[in-house]
Amino acid sequence: MANSKRTLFLKRRQRVRNKLRKGNVGKVRLSVHRSNKNISAQLIDDVNGVTIASASSLEKDLGVVGKNNVVAAAKVGATLAERAKKAEVETCYFDRGGFLFHGRVKALADAAREGGLKF
């Protein structure tokens, strides 16, 4: 029986997240979610179960509502890095979920690095 795309995605997401958790105990996690229409990212403290900062292409002040391209992803990454500085977070680890590190996900990561986040 063939696995569905969703099942394969969920397995890949768990595999990536479990490998990351082993080497990054106590660090903040930068989690990325990408859909066909939007992209969002969150800084999550897994120890306390709290979201520290978040950014999304749905926010009107970014000016990219309804667009999901590399430019929008870069703006989301830069905004998240800015909010992380306000929350006094400098280091984190990048959880790409089940998404490939390519295109929009890579653009978000690069913009966050340029904004001052270290991962």
Image (cartoon, grey):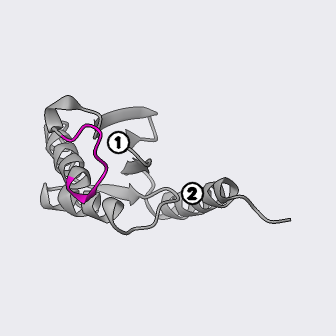
Residue designated by label 2: 13
Q: Amino acid at mark 2?
A: Arg
Residue sitting at the far right: 1
Mark 2 crowd level (few <14, some 14–19, many ≥20, 10 Å Cα): some
Q: Secondary structure at mark 2?
A: helix
Tell whether 19 sits left or right of 80.
Answer: right
**Residue 42, numbered label:** 1
The image quadrant where one finds the C terminus is: bottom left
Point out residue 101 in the picture as x, y percentages from the top left corner: 39, 68
Q: Considering depth in this image, is 71 or 116 the residue closer to the camera?
A: 71
Point out residue 93 in the picture as x, y percentages from the top left corner: 36, 58
Q: Secondary structure at mark 1?
A: strand
Report the magenta residues as a range.
64-71
Q: CA distance from mark 2 to mark 1?
A: 16 Å
Tell whether 71 sits left or right of 39.
Answer: left
Residue occupying image coordinates x 76% and y 62%: 3
Residue 65 forms part of the magenta stretch: yes
Identify the mark nearer the N-term, 2 or 1: 2
Q: Amino acid at mark 1?
A: Gln
Residue 70 forms part of the magenta stretch: yes
Tell whether 65 sits left or right of 19.
Answer: left
